[in-house]
Image (cartoon, rainbow, N blue to C red):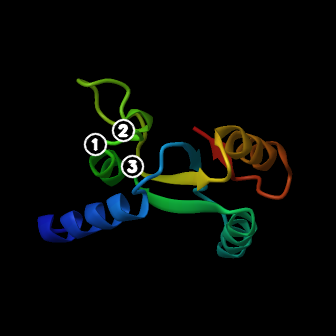
Amino acid sequence: MSRYVKGLVIDDIRRRLEGVEDAVVVNVVGMTANHAVKLRKELRQKQFGLLVVRSNLARLATQGTGLEGAFSAGTDSKNPYSGSTAIIWGGSDFVSLAKEVTRLADGSDYKEFETK
């Protein structure tokens, strides 16, 4: 991916997460397309958003925002996640977000779904 394209992707991620203060990082790698669509629809109905991104691009896109800490373990360290990462945000507050993510992680509908 060229620098120009990376810049466009980073700008798009930044735009989508604009104003988001609370989010949870999860793993959905290995989930079938049908399960992913079902999960996105279920989350959308409850006013949550789900975005799957490359971890490194998410780290760059969230620099200087409230979500920066979710993608860096410290100022001198590399991104603690590798490959693809999913970000879930929304709901009325962080507690409702955490409850929904916990429900999904503990349930049997999405076996590949796990928190990071």
State the SS at label 3.
Answer: helix
The total number of labels drawn is 3
User: Counting other residues with Cα less than 10 Å from the Cα at mark 3, is it few (<14), some (14-19), or many (20 or more)?
Assistant: many
Nearest-to-viewer mark from 1 and 3 = 1
Residue 56, percent from left and from top: 32, 48
**Residue underneath mark 2:** 68
State the SS at label 2.
Answer: helix
Question: Which image quarter holds the C terminus?
Answer: top right
**Residue underneath mark 1:** 63
Q: Residue at x 20, y 71 (%)?
A: 5
Q: Measure the C-alpha gap from mark 1 to mark 3.
A: 13 Å
**Residue underneath mark 3:** 55
Residue 102, percent from left and from top: 76, 41
* 106 sits to left or right of 112: right
Mark 3: amino acid: Ser
Identify which residue, 97 or 28, lies in the foreground.
97
Mark 1 vs 2: CB contact within 8 A: yes
Q: Measure the C-alpha gap from mark 3 to mark 2.
A: 12 Å
Above or below, 46 relative to 83: below
Q: Residue at x 81, y 45 (%)?
A: 103
* 57 sits to left or right of 3: right
Q: Residue at x 29, y 32 (%)?
A: 78
